[in-house]
Amino acid sequence: MSDKIYSYQQLHSFALNAFLKMGCSNEDAILATNVLLSADLRGIDSHGIARLVGYVRLWEVGRINATPNIKIIHETPSTAVVDGDEGLGLVVAPKAMQIAMEKAKQVGTGWVSVKNSNHFGIAGYHAMMALSQDMIGMAMTNASALVAPTYAAEKMLGTNPIAVAVPAGNEAPFVADFATTTAANGKLEIAQRKNESIPTGWAQDAEGNASNDAYILKQGGALLPLGSEKELGSHKGYALGSIVDIFSAVLSGASFGPWAPPFPAYVPMPENMPGEGLGHFLGAMRIDAFRPAADFKLNMDIWLNRFRNAKPATGHDKVYVAGDIERAMEVERMQNGIPLVKEVEKDLIQLAEKLKLDF
Amino acid sequence: MSDKIYSYQQLHSFALNAFLKMGCSNEDAILATNVLLSADLRGIDSHGIARLVGYVRLWEVGRINATPNIKIIHETPSTAVVDGDEGLGLVVAPKAMQIAMEKAKQVGTGWVSVKNSNHFGIAGYHAMMALSQDMIGMAMTNASALVAPTYAAEKMLGTNPIAVAVPAGNEAPFVADFATTTAANGKLEIAQRKNESIPTGWAQDAEGNASNDAYILKQGGALLPLGSEKELGSHKGYALGSIVDIFSAVLSGASFGPWAPPFPAYVPMPENMPGEGLGHFLGAMRIDAFRPAADFKLNMDIWLNRFRNAKPATGHDKVYVAGDIERAMEVERMQNGIPLVKEVEKDLIQLAEKLKLDF
């Protein structure tokens, strides 16, 4: 049986009402909904409306503050640390990105490290905020520990994504947005639903041996850093995940490494947390702080065009630039709707009942 | 037969004299030598004295200017573009990093994109310059095209390394420095010397099929981005290499993508180059632009200690943090000397004859 399709507007209006029920202001609820739904539109289903139930549960147990006092607690002309006051990351992160862009307007670049926040949706949304301002945008976040370092048998890092958005002229922009692991956890969930095994290189068991079991994380296993194993460069993926953790959490005073707060509300908070909440890192660089934006865009168009027209490998039709596939998906889903798998649909129907909303 | 061992001092004095013969100023020759030899000390043999012959050849064909007028051509309080005037990257990059650090002192962070430069040695050297100033340092560079994008059968990107150095308190610092490919080209050269095949995932042939041939790059093949193949996340390594290319070269006005200037002097320059020379990107973030350095270091020590003491996987004794292995190598080689493989030794003896130097 195929998944049922919902229009963007249907899902948007449901999520908006859920955030309003949580007590978010109108403005914050709209912002949170826009960020959340951008994941569904771009085909990153694990980070979209499927997570709405999770956010509500965190709010129910008092780990999300629907009316946060988001404030700068330290700053210089090009930097700031923002305290998210336990707000929705979906609201805290775009506000922090706005601060980064304001600073970039003044002194060329702006860099904001955030503490005391929660899951911020897809990193790409925040990075892409910079595009219309002729800025390069960057966003990263730490997350609850699912990933084992190279040579380790312990979950120490989150999937810690990095997003970088670069404006162009006539060509569609460059938008990278990826977890610093070989495969995101959402891919294991898809394999679980299909009752399939997972490829070697995605995960390991509790002792650190390779595993093809899609359920291995529930048995003490871990995801693997980008590169999968030492011989294929997993120490590089481990370093990238570490950098995201340090920039997002150690620099801001959020909780880091294995102490990052878990997303599922039923998982108890780690003991002896060394910082407050989850951390993000947002950056903006004004193009014309380096060279005239028109010159840059001309070169960026040459870059994008050359890569999009690179000679394909045997068995492939086309070479893509980061963001191309997600952009096409966004056009398709805005027009034809967003499919929801049975489990997500069921979750949302239950959520609607609980919150006394229509779905 | 085992490799002959040379003392750091022996190799330092030879390289210094070679740079002086090229016409570098005393100050520049010392700087270039320090940067170059830091690679040998840290065990990144492909980027150290083994490359000295290559630099001299580039100078002979007029592609390296030994007395460059390195200057800022555009700037804001937190950014600059530097024109390297075809100087040695070994000299241009640390000077650009110095500018980034000066800007960080003034406004919290500094970001410098460099054009018209050459190969800059190991990225880690430049990033580590920030450590003693209580700053986070970053360095990246583009390089001549050896890497095929995901789904492509064409060399479009260099091995485009990223380095990030983070200061700590009592613990040794975090120093990541890695090519954005699965394996660096130096690893293929080692396999060639040993007459061994290479692991699946390092390289592909001219049509884009997996290859285990250590000589495949000479037959139209390419290195693979970190992740090796799409299913294992190679699109992420491809995105990382792209980001390095854009920040280093499109932002500065250097030549980018497949048009990056080749390191071997006998390879003709690409036609219709869209920019000038090789590009670098250097960054510095003052820790206390975010939070008091003492607080940060206390947390960073907790981070480093926790990761260094993570539970090892079966078959391993220890979990490392980025830079640990290179730091131990540096101590070892400073004390016991640096081994040179036969081919490199022979190259250096010939170079000594040509430049009328002792080796």
Image: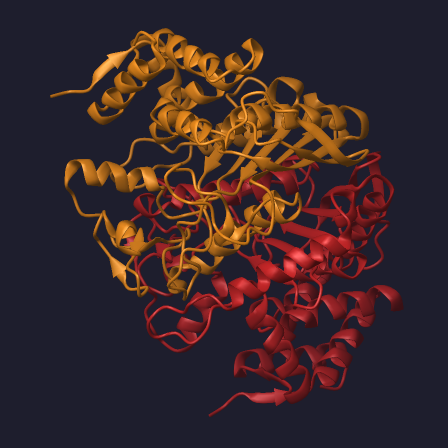
Chain colours: A orange, B red
- Of residue A315 and residue A185, the one placed in the foreground of this image is A185
The quadrant of the rendering that contains the C terminus of chain B is bottom right
Residue B253: give x, y in percent of width and height: 69, 36
State how many labels appear. Answer: 0
Is A36 situated above or below A194?
Answer: above
Q: Image quarter for residue B42?
A: bottom right
Would residue B198 be seen by someone viewing this image from the given angle? yes
Residue B270: give x, y in percent of width and height: 57, 44
Q: Image quarter for residue A169?
A: top right
Q: Residue at x 69, y 53 (%)?
A: B118
User: In the picture provided, is A24 more to the left or to the right than B191?
Assistant: right
Q: Image quarter for residue A75?
A: top right
Residue B246: give x, y in percent of width and height: 60, 37
Which residue lies most toward the bottom here? Answer: B1
Which residue lies most toward the front here? Answer: A61
User: In the picture provided, is A190 more to the left or to the right than A157?
Assistant: left
User: In the picture provided, is A180 more to the left or to the right than B24?
Assistant: left
Is A204 situated above or below B288?
Answer: below
Q: Residue at x 87, y 42 (%)?
A: B106
User: In the picture provided, is B275 more to the left or to the right than A277?
Assistant: right
- Of residue B289 and residue B80, the one placed in the foreground of this image is B289
Residue A9: give x, y in percent of width and height: 38, 7
Q: Residue at x 84, y 35 (%)?
A: B77
Would residue B44 be seen by someone viewing this image from the given angle? no
